[in-house]
């Protein structure tokens, strides 16, 4: 029997600000390279798609204008998202998408844009932009996995008591630059600020999400290794480079010097 | 009078700083300007007065350098003296440094200042400089680590255009709905663009910006795309549509590895096949016309356009053709990959990805670029270099490039290895180098040292980053 994975790409047009569509590509190819059939379903605003048909749903971040359009459309999907999650669908939301899965986003003027509350977090607009490479740690099947990504956000996200952060920040700001947490998870719903795209340099995390999505079909699949040598080299190099970069970032442009 | 004295005092002090830096073997792209501005805060107002309006500012995401090189080159061809910033030093300090180093003592009728200006910097200087022309090339995602989102960048430029003087012409890329969004009300605005239906692609395979109308928010509709979000667009919601282009480029076709086309009935010829350069030519043409040059005065220049300084610059190293191009954002990379596709006999492509501040510290943009194009073009190897070489290798891997990927961190060593590798099987084959900003000049020096530019074209020489820009000071 051939396995089949259905990936829902939520608002590919509205939430395409960063490279997060890469996560869809990475999940798709890593599954295909192992002989798993993949169907990628685009879900644009107002599209009537039952998210219960998706094993995994991925969403990115967008510009303010676009994000408020998404906020409205998501309200309509709220029940469907909850149903999908109850049916075992894995949800991965990055940055703006993560904020919208929370309770609300409070703008600088105090206006509250409602999210859909599938994660018990809320976000408040901040002055300082938190920008740069991030190193964090999360738990994968009882093992600590180091995760590399890039954050670029001014919103500060806070977790309600009892809500699990997805990761702990080693370097970088994470959710709010204060409590050392990064992202949030609730069952099979994952939110994070990490771009990169997230799954590019974290192949074990990608495979773990694929396994989680397959579990929904009752399949306990052991995924074969893919020989991720560039990924391993990139991780090792970035860990060293982050230490180096600390002393190197300068606000000057155009010296032409190497 | 006292003001004028203070201006020159600031300028001479800055110039002394510049000499000291150069004597110490340092590059002086910002410090002399910092010094001059500190001594005389009204520096730019004095510059604006000196040029009495004969100032061209060029802003936008891509094409700033090429456009300002073209404007400067055509003006000089016609005996104008030109002050311009080079090496991409396009923030306030960089502009001031260019003036400090190049401004001649005596005033002349035919002199101009041509500046490429960072999108966030235009608003800071536009009132003081009181330019005759402001060019807005296009808006693409770029440097989000510095500016946040693209809408904000468009707003910044729109805010600047609202404050240009009466006499100023805003020259805006009309094929880009985002650039059109920056057009001011109640000012002189001209929209340049392509009249080239045969170049329209039916669907954009690339990530594109500005999918929604700037006025009513409705999704834009397109009869076709030239590249990125540039194309023949219209809004079904409010009826806003692409303005009729003036100046327009017509009859564009590939010819001998480059492009030939017409602007206002003038024949134009480019030595590279990048469609985006046609826009740069249009913008430059519009700008020099607004400064008072006649069509006849640019006829010769238009017929011999050579791109240089990392904008698809051609070299010959050990008898192998090598092409060097700067890439800094997804749209730019996509356009360069199309150029690679249009070039016969390519053996190796070298991708250099750095993450220093001037490159942008966020390298995730490569996932928005259409590297899948690589596999449609038959060549031997992809090489990845730079501080984030592995990130590029991962991207190429997911593009399912079927050939070999090799990673050598040091850019020059990587190019050297690519040259050697191709020599055995196809000695005449071209090596393409696409690099982010901070390796551009080092690679260029390396290539010049190992070989040379492909043909001794006077215009290419003119664009060499001469220390102190001796040519323009004269
Ligand atoms: Zn409209």
Image: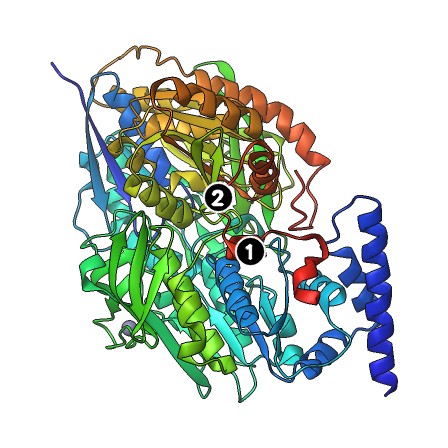
Q: Which residue is drawn at the image coordinates 48% and 71% (left, top)?
A: B135
The quadrant of the image that shows the N terminus of chain B is bottom right
For residue B348, which quarter of the picture?
top left
Res. A61 in view: no
Residue B449, position in %: x, y?
Answer: 60, 34
Residue B30, position in %: x, y?
Answer: 73, 56
Q: Which residue is mark 2?
A: A121
Instruction: Left or right? Give the position of B339 relative to B421.
Output: left
Instruction: Left or right? Give the position of B466 relative to B100.
Output: left
Q: Which residue is mark 1?
A: B147
- What colour scheme was applied to this rendering of the protein? rainbow
| Count of numbered marks | 2
Residue B328, position in %: x, y?
Answer: 49, 46
Most foreground residue, A256 or B139: A256
Residue B216, position in %: x, y?
Answer: 31, 73
Give the Cα separation between the discs numbered 1 and 2: 27 Å
Most foreground residue, A193 or B417: B417
Q: Chain of mark 1?
A: B
For residue B44, which quarter of the picture?
bottom right
Callouts 1 and 2 close, C-beta under 8 Å: no
Instruction: Left or right? Give the position of B16 relative to A139.
Output: right
Q: Decide: is B384 above or below A253.
A: above
- At mark 1, the secondary structure is helix
The quadrant of the image that shows the C terminus of chain B is bottom right
């Amino acid at each position: 029997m051939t396995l089949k994975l259905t990936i829902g790409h939520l608002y590919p047009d509205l939430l395409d600000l960063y490279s997060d569509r890469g996560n869809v590509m990475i999940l798709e190819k890593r599954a295909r390279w192992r002989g798993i059939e993949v169907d990628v379903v685009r879900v644009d605003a107002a599209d009537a798609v039952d998210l219960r048909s998706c094993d995994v749903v991925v969403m990115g971040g967008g510009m303010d204008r676009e994000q408020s359009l998404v906020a409205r459309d998501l309200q309509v999907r709220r029940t469907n998202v909850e149903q999908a999650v109850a049916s075992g669908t894995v949800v991965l939301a990055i940055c703006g998408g993560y904020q919208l899965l929370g309770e609300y986003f409070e703008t600088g003027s105090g206006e509250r844009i409602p999210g859909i509350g599938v994660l018990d977090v809320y976000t408040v607009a901040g002055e300082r932009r938190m920008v740069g490479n991030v190193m964090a740690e999360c738990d994968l099947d009882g093992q600590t996995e180091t995760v590399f990504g890039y954050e670029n956000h001014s919103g500060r996200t806070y977790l309600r008591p009892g809500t699990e952060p997805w990761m702990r920040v080693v370097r970088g700001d994470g959710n709010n630059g204060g409590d050392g947490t990064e992202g949030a998870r609730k069952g099979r719903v994952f939110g994070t600020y990490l771009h990169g795209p997230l799954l590019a340099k974290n192949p074990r995390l990608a495979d773990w999400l694929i396994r989680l999505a397959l579990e929904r079909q009752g399949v306990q699949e052991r995924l074969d290794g893919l020989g991720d040598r560039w990924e391993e080299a990139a991780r090792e190099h970035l860990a060293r480079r982050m230490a180096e970069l600390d002393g190197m970032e300068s606000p000057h442009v155009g010296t032409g010097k190497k | 009078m006292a003001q004028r004295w203070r201006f020159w005092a600031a300028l001479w002090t800055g110039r002394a700083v510049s000499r000291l830096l150069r004597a110490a073997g340092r590059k002086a792209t910002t410090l002399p300007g910092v010094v001059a501005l500190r001594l005389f805060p009204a520096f730019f107002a004095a510059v604006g007065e000196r040029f009495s309006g004969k100032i061209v500012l060029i802003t936008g995401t891509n094409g700033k350098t090429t456009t300002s090189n073209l404007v400067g080159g055509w003006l000089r061809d016609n005996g104008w003296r030109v002050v311009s910033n080079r090496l991409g030093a396009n923030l306030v300090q960089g502009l001031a440094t260019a003036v400090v180093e190049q401004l001649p003592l005596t005033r002349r009728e035919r002199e101009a200042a041509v500046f490429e200006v960072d999108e966030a910097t235009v608003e800071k200087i536009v009132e003081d400089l009181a330019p005759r022309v402001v060019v807005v090339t296009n808006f693409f995602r770029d440097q989000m680590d510095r500016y946040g989102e693209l809408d904000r960048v468009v707003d910044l430029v729109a805010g600047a255009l609202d404050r240009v003087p009466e006499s100023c012409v805003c020259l805006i890329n009309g094929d880009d709905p985002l650039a059109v969004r920056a057009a001011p009300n109640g000012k002189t605005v001209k929209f340049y663009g392509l009249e080239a239906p045969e170049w329209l692609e039916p669907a954009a395979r690339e990530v594109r910006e500005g999918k929604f109308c700037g006025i009513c928010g409705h999704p834009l509709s397109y009869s076709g795309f030239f590249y990125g979000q540039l194309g023949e667009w219209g809004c079904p919601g409010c009826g806003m549509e692409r303005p009729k282009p003036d100046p327009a480029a017509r009859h564009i076709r590939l010819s001998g590895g480059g492009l030939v086309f017409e602007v206002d009935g003038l024949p134009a010829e480019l030595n590279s096949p990048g469609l985006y350069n046609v826009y740069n030519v249009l913008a430059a043409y519009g700008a020099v016309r607004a400064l008072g040059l006649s069509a006849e005065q640019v006829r010769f220049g238009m017929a011999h356009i050579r791109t240089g300084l990392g904008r698809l610059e051609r070299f010959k190293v050990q008898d192998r053709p090598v092409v060097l191009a700067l890439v800094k954002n997804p749209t730019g990379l996509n356009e360069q990959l199309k150029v690679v596709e249009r070039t016969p006999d390519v053996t190796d492509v070298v991708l250099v990805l750095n993450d220093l501040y001037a490159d942008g510290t966020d390298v995730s943009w490569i996932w928005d670029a259409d590297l899948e194009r690589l596999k449609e073009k038959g060549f031997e190897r992809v090489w990845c270099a730079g501080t984030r070489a592995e990130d590029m290798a991962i991207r190429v891997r997911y593009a399912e490039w079927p050939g070999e990927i090799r990673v050598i961190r040091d850019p020059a060593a990587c190019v050297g290895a690519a040259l050697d590798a191709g020599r055995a099987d196809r000695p005449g084959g071209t090596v393409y180098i696409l690099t982010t900003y901070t390796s551009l000049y080092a690679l260029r020096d390396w290539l010049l040292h190992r070989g040379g530019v492909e043909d001794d074209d006077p215009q290419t020489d003119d664009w060499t980053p001469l220390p102190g820009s001796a040519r323009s000071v004269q």
